[in-house]
């Protein structure tokens, strides 16, 4: 390899590193701004939902569950409770539809149950956009994500797989789409995924068993 070619390769690598750094800084800035604004603006809605859940069924209105984050690190993910207290700690696609409370069905339909996860975004455990965080018990999905380099990115509230309607019942397919996102993510692409979710896509994350 010539000195000139080596210099060009070095410049190319530096350019890629600079681009990635700029992306992560922009992504984190967006996460903080949107999460903070969302929690402030959504505070009245959260308070109303909190009271409604307390009235609708027994148990804490907040549902806390351990999930797997970037680099395999576990963290506590927060949501509004949409299922009856005592429901088995299973992935959503393995949970019976009858476990969802009447109010919970509406909260899930309008994504209101996801609002507390903005706190997870503020703390840096999650991002607005990224692979959906799974349970530690979902060993197959975790292994597939690790092999495909997915665990190097923060999990998200929404993401490419969610917008495409792919849920965790298809771990290999999910991991492949997650990997596609992890290796090609851009700031503009993240904005598009957020907008797609807002207009009604992303149903894959909320599917439960019908029986």
Image (spheres, rainbow, N blue to C red):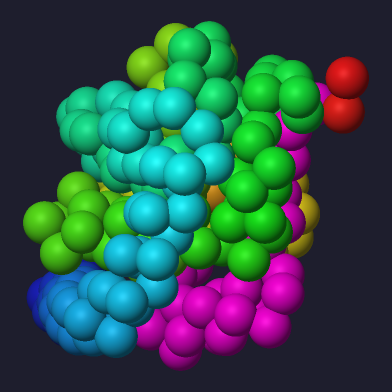
Specify the principal SS of the magenta part: helix
Q: Is residue 183 visible?
A: no
- Point out residue 136 in the picture as x, y percentages from the top left corner: 37, 17
Please give the range of residues in magenta. 183-209
- Name which residue lies at 22% across and 53% down: 120
Q: Is residue 206 above or below residue 113?
A: above
Direction from residue 65 to residue 141 in the image, left or right: right
**Residue 203 in magenta stretch:** yes
Query: Residue placed at 22% from the left, 27% from the top?
Result: 74
Q: Quadrant of residue 135?
A: top left
What residue is at 47 percent from the left and 20 percent from the top?
85
Q: Note whether residue 154 is visible.
A: yes
Q: Residue 163: where, in percent of width, then height?
A: 68, 64
* Residue 190 falls inside the magenta stretch: yes
Query: Quick one: 50 or 176, which is closer to the camera?
Result: 50
Q: Which quadrant of the structure image shows residue 10?
A: bottom left
- Asked where in the image residue 170 lies, by quadrant, the reply is top right
66 to the left or right of 147: left
């Amino acid at each position: 390899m010539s000195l000139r070619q080596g210099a060009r390769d070095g410049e190319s690598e530096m350019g890629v590193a600079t681009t990635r750094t700029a992306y992560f800084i922009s992504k984190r800035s967006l996460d903080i701004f949107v999460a903070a604004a969302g929690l402030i603006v959504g505070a009245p809605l959260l308070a109303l939902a909190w009271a409604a859940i307390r009235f609708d069924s027994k148990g804490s209105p907040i549902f806390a569950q351990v999930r797997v984050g970037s680099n395999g690190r576990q963290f506590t993910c927060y949501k509004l409770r949409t299922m009856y207290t005592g429901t088995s700690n299973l992935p959503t696609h393995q949970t019976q539809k009858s476990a969802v409370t009447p109010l919970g069905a509406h909260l899930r339909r309008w994504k209101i149950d996801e609002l507390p996860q903005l706190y997870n975004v503020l703390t840096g455990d999650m991002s607005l956009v990224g692979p959906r965080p799974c349970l530690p018990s979902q060993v197959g999905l975790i292994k597939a994500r690790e092999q495909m380099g997915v665990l190097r990115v923060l999990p998200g509230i929404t993401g490419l797989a969610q917008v495409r309607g792919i849920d965790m019942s298809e771990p290999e397919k999910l991991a492949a789409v997650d990997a596609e996102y992890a290796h090609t993510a851009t700031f503009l692409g993240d904005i598009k995924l957020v907008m797609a979710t807002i207009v009604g896509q992303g149903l894959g994350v909320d599917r439960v068993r019908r029986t």
